[in-house]
Image: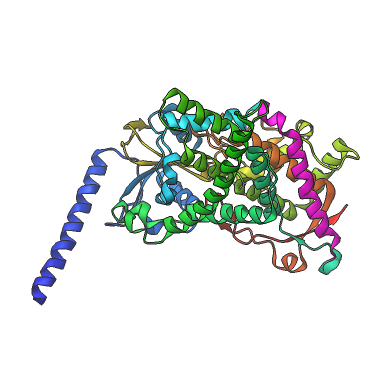
Amino acid sequence: MASFLLVSIMLSLLLVLFSHLLQLIAAARRHLPPGPCPLPLIGNLLDIGDLPHRSFARLAERYGPLMTVRLGAATCVVASSPATARAVLQTHNASLAGRGRQDAWHAGGHAENSVFVLPPGRKWRLLRKLGAAHLFSRRKLAELAPLRDEIVGGLLRRVAERADHRGGGGGGAPVDVGRLALAANVELLWRSVFSTRLDAATLDVLCDVAREAAVLLGTPNISDFFPAVAALDLQGLRRRLAELMKNTYRLVDAQIDHRMRCRELRGGRGGEAMDLLDVLLDMSEQEREDGDDDVINRDLMRALLTDLFVGGSDSTATTVEWAMAELLQNPEIMKTLQQEIKMVLGTRSQVEESDIGQLPYLQAIVKETLRLHPIVPLRLYEAERTVEIEGHTIPIGSKVIVNAWAIHQSAKVWIQPEKFLPERFITKDIDFTGRHFEFIPFGSGRHICIGLPLANRMLHMILGSLMLQFKWTMPQMVNRNGLDMAEKFGLAVSMATRPNIIASKM
């Protein structure tokens, strides 16, 4: 019996090794881009640490700007230069525009209606159009400008309250800028979508959901590397995310039900000044009247609105947090910024959208923050057809990763790329709309971040207003030990240790 077991084990090992050898031969024949030699079964997983964007960048230095890595059962091609990013996001965008769905997104069936993971098609185009036309269009953004001013004003009042409480070292009490910015963005989106105020308890729930979901969705998942065992959800990520989605769906459902009752009482659809929820309900009713497919149903509404709160809130707040951290470590840059803002705004108390164009140094600081700390450092796609890039084959079904962080950190593209130098953008005519492939913090092509117009406004308004009204310093212990700039990988790469910094009134 023992000998039979030993023979079985030996045969299994030989089978695995033989299968692995065949895979290596097949890869060579397919002319895949170069890359590290994969181990049997696990591939190159041991080469990838807790910060995949940095691991991929390190490997690219050895194997080139277009390389192949095996992550478990998945073949991944990683693009790490402006030229290869252009090839993926522009030249071959139609063939490489599939979305490699992470298993966690399937929580509660969310992936079937999520703009973040749906492949290009009718439903995906509809969701993009709904957001672009009824939340992020120039007309809608202008209409909601007073609301953004009000939200930023509320954020400043909350910081002022902390600044009035004297803490150690003679300054104000510590301020969690990231959390306050997150709350401001959640409240803004809620009121933009539902036209109702948000109570404190619901606000806390949504902030917690946004933060935790961002972490879960960025956690390396065995289910993604070995789809054969995905149904087991071995790490429990899908189950934990399902609970978060359930909490958000419950809040969204309450708003949908309340709006439907209000519409029934007034006997009609939304009025002229409709919010996004009215638009969704009108389109749903029109579909039923026309006998069309039930596309805009309750599940789609839930998913779209949940995506807005999860994906559209924490990323902006995280960027504000990184910007504040960089400025605290560069007090001369902070001083120059504050002087610019004061000179332009005079006696006014907060930055408004009309001021942004007159604040080039503020714009440069936002860009430099996004260069060093791109909101989503890795963008994941899937090859829907086999294509050729730089003489190498990208086979159908393979994962394609654009490493924006590696591009932003390339010494071939940027002078002293590791340093925080906003001045580089004063003389460099470049923006983050996806036209310049050396700077793609919001992506490019058909999958460019749909919320870019709003994020652009809020980043400048929040950061500029915080710099205008307050003097910022680090707590004494942080001054002694230095600010911890370590990263934590997630849907957005955040600071591993979120700093509480000191605000005092100017």
Q: Position of residue 161 (x, y in %)?
A: 82, 57
Q: Foreground residue, 370 or 414?
A: 370
Q: Foreground residue, 48 or 414?
A: 48
Q: Foreground residue, 456 or 124?
A: 124
Please name the colour scheme applied to the rendered image. Answer: rainbow
Q: Foreground residue, 194 or 329?
A: 194
The residue range painted magenta reads 139-166
Decide if residue 309 is on the left or right side of residue 480: left
Please name the predominant secondary structure of the magenta segment in the image: helix
Q: Position of residue 480 (x, y in %)?
A: 73, 68
Decide if residue 299 is on the left or right side of residue 475: left
- Residue at point 77% right, 39% down? 149
- Above or below, comparing residue 417 to residue 10 in the picture: above
Name the quadrant of the N terminus. bottom left
- Residue at point 37% right, 51% down? 224
Residue 163 magenta-highlighted: yes
Residue sitting at the far right? 347
Q: Quadrant of residue 288?
A: top left
Residue 353 magenta-highlighted: no
